[in-house]
Image: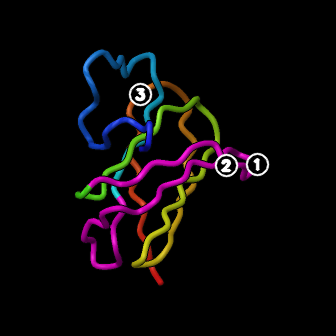
Amino acid sequence: MCGAPKQGQTLPAGVDAEKETVLTGQVLDGSGDPVAGAFVRLLDGTGEFTAEVVASATGDFRFFAAPGNWTLRALSSQGNGQTEIAPEGPGVHVHDVTVTR
């Protein structure tokens, strides 16, 4: 069983968004519909694997990270996609990932 927290856009109780850097969003297909069950990987600025979660039934994912350069990569049966992000400080940073074949 995966040890990742339950995925969703709502932050769990006790998370201080003024102190934490939260990377969150949805995996979407080319039509903008959510992609359930996609594997979402967090890669650091050098492209090294850091973490992975499974998107929720509504395509939601969430990571807790440090400020810096990151890549969000989604892998699914509907295709793959990625987006580059660079949060400069704490807060909730929302970035969707669109997958295509």
Left-right relation of 72 to 55: right
Question: Residue 46, labelled with which disc?
Answer: 1
Question: Residue 91, labelled with which disc?
Answer: 3
Instruction: Give the residue type that dot 3 points to.
Output: Gly
Instruction: Give the residue type that dot 2 points to.
Output: Phe
Cα distance in 3D space between marks 1 and 3: 23 Å
Residue that appears at 33% across and 56% down: 26
Where does label 2 land, which residue? Answer: 49
Q: Quadrant of residue 62?
A: top left
Residue depth check, mark 1 versus mark 2: number of the one nearer the observer: 2
Residue depth check, mark 1 versus mark 3: number of the one nearer the observer: 1
Instruction: Give the residue type that dot 1 points to.
Output: Thr
Q: Which residue lies furthest to the front in this view?
A: 1
- Which region of the structure is painted magenta? 27-56
Give x and y (percent) for residue 37: 35, 61
Cα distance in 3D space between marks 1 and 2: 9 Å
Question: Residue 11, labelled with which disc?
Answer: none
Residue that appears at 52% across and 26% down: 89
Cα distance in 3D space between marks 3 and 2: 22 Å
Classed neighbour count for the residue bearing mark 1: other residues with Cα under 10 Å, few (<14), some (14–19), many (≥20):
few
Residue 6 in magenta stretch: no
Q: Is mark 2 on a helix, strand or loop?
A: strand
Instruction: Name the foreground residue: 35 vs 92.
Output: 35
Q: Quadrant of residue 93?
A: top left
Ranked by sequence position, the earlier of labels 1 and 3 is 1
User: Which quadrant, please, contains the N terminus?
Assistant: top left
Give x and y (percent) for residue 44: 67, 44
Q: Is mark 1 on a helix, strand or loop?
A: loop
